[in-house]
Amino acid sequence: MLREIIRPTSEFYNIHIPKEYINHEVEIMVLPLFELGNQTNIQVEKKSFDPRNFYGITSSDQESIDQYLSNNKNEWE
């Protein structure tokens, strides 16, 4: 994902599309931005999904989760 904050000086702006986005659908949005101070030209790296980041997010224990998943699986069989 790319994000760039600019202060345009005309009605036209050229953008660079990364090679990995070519022949894929992309969304280009132009929105007004409220002041962030001196932050400009911010680029955000796309982070990979890591399920370990979700450890402890629920108060359910492993046994109740396994039972829930097993019940849902049985409904489809």
Image: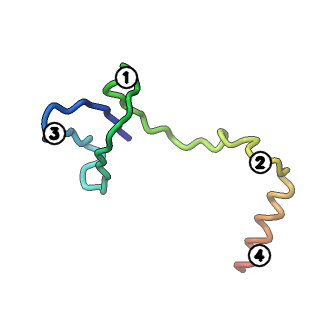
Badge 4 marks a residue whose secondary structure is helix
Q: What residue type is labelled 1?
A: Gln
Residue 63: quarter of image: bottom right
Badge 4 crowding class, 10 Å Cα cut-off, few under 14, some 14 to 19, many 20 or more, is few
Badge 1 crowding class, 10 Å Cα cut-off, few under 14, some 14 to 19, many 20 or more, is few
The CA span between labels 1 and 2 is 36 Å
Q: What residue type is labelled 2?
A: Thr
- Which residue matches tag 4? 74
The CA span between labels 4 and 2 is 23 Å
- Which residue matches tag 3? 14
Where is 29 relative to 53, above or below? Answer: below
Where is 38 relative to 1, above or below? Answer: above
- Which residue matches tag 1? 39
Q: Which of marks 3 and 4 is nearer the N terminus?
A: 3
Task: Depth check: give the residue in front, 30 or 28.
Answer: 30
On the image, the x and y values in percent for residue 64 come to 85, 58
Residue 51: quarter of image: top right
Q: Which of marks 4 and 1 is in front?
A: 1
- Which residue matches tag 2? 58
Q: Earlier in the sequence, mark 4 or mark 1?
A: 1
